[in-house]
Amino acid sequence: MHIERKADQIDLEVRTARPGVVVGRGGAGIEALRVGLQKQIKDETRQIKINVVEVARVDADAGLICEYITQQLERRVSFRRVVRQAIQRAQRAGVEGIKIQVSGRLNGAEIARTEWTREGRVPLHTLRANIDYAYRTAQTTYGILGVKTWVFKGEVIPGQESVPEDNKAQPRRRQPRRRQQFDDRSNNDS
């Protein structure tokens, strides 16, 4: 979710895997959200603009991976199993590397600890690395667990044009070959 406040308008961008659920039939979900937000801010002059954006690769988004892990931890699933499943799903989505860290009273242990798992490359000190980071907390019966996720999506090379992800999936059309033209260098004096 991304909120942008202007003088007379609030722009709200909701990123979701299933936009149909948020929008509802005929935009009823968005309208209900707009009315609820209007009541919350108690300012009738400000206009609320809601934009729903679909996340193309759900298992490659750090925020959604974190959300999935926290939901599973709140249902008392073993943290190692949840982390392993999340890493496998991310690798199937085509990320170059992922690192997940879970902290707190893991599996209800008396003493809190921090455990992390990494698969692939996650170069945190490389400036041109495209790394998606997210942090969420899970409210469990034995305390709060913190979940951090780093997803390495590749390197961004300066000066190179960035291609939208949708265009990468489509095969490129081959350009028609031009016939090579050669200069006539024969020794014909006539």
Image: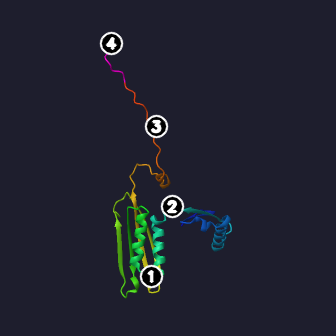
Q: Position of residue 14 (x, y in %)?
A: 56, 65
Residue at the disc numbered 4: 189
Residue at the disc numbered 3: 176
Foreground mark, 4 or 2, reads 4
Residue at coordinates 40% horizontally, 74% vertically from top-left?
A: 83
The earlier-in-sequence mark between 2 and 3 is 2
Neighbours of disc 2 within 10 Å: few (<14), some (14-19), many (20+): some
**Hey, what amino acid is under mark 1?**
Ile
Residue at coordinates 42% horizontally, 75% vertically from top-left?
A: 82
**Hey, what amino acid is under mark 4?**
Asp
**Hey, what amino acid is under mark 3?**
Pro
Q: Position of residue 112 (x, y in %)?
A: 37, 83
> Which label belongs to residue 56?
2
140 and 135: which is toward the camera? 140
**Hey, what amino acid is under mark 2?**
Ala
- Quarter of the image with the N terminus is bottom right
Residue at coordinates 39% horizontally, 82% vertically from top-left?
A: 106
Distance between the Cα atoms at labels 4 and 3?
A: 36 Å
Distance between the Cα atoms at labels 2 and 1?
A: 31 Å
Foreground mark, 4 or 1, reads 4
Neighbours of disc 4 within 10 Å: few (<14), some (14-19), many (20+): few
The image quadrant of residue 116 is bottom left
The span picked out in magenta is 183-190
Labelled pair 4, 3 in contact (Cβ < 8 Å): no
Foreground mark, 1 or 3, reads 3
Q: In the image, is residue 187 part of the stretch drawn in magenta?
A: yes
Distance between the Cα atoms at labels 4 and 1?
A: 93 Å
Neighbours of disc 3 within 10 Å: few (<14), some (14-19), many (20+): few
Foreground mark, 2 or 1, reads 2
The earlier-in-sequence mark between 4 and 1 is 1
